[in-house]
Amino acid sequence: MTTALLVLLSVAVLAVSLALLLASWDLALLADALAVTAALCGLAAFALVAAFTVRRARQLGKAARP
């Protein structure tokens, strides 16, 4: 999970920084595409952490039952 999360966050950070650079060069369409890519990576990272948390909570719940 941590490797996938780090990759997603790294891609998001790279996309945001490139989007800002392209926006300063007046390349709005490419900047918008990279901003959308960063947003999708952020949502995917959120979903990944939520799924991991739910799976971990279920494992701990099963261990607590007699």
Image: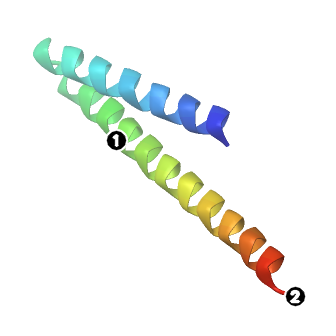
Q: How is the image coloured?
A: rainbow
Q: How many marks?
A: 2
Determine which residue is flagged by label 1.
36
- Tell me the quarter of the image containing the C terminus: bottom right
Is residue 34 depicted above or below 43 in this figure? above
Q: Identify residue type, mark 2.
A: Pro
At 25% across and 27% down in the image, what residue appears? 31
> Is 66 or 6 nearer to us in this picture?
66
At 73% across and 78% down in the image, what residue appears? 61
**Alpha carbons under labels 1 and 2: distance apart:** 47 Å
Q: Is residue 2 left or right of residue 66?
A: left
Q: Is residue 53 left or right of residue 11?
A: right
> Is 53 or 64 nearer to us in this picture?
64
Is residue 65 depicted above or below 35 in this figure? below
In the rendered structure, which disc, 1 or 2, sits on the residue that comes first in sequence? 1
- Tell me the quarter of the image containing the N terminus: top right
Residue 23 screen position, x and y as percent: 16, 21
Q: Residues within 10 Å of mark 1 (few under 14, many from 20)?
A: some
Determine which residue is flagged by label 2.
66
Q: Is residue 24 left or right of residue 57?
A: left
Q: Identify residue type, mark 1.
A: Val
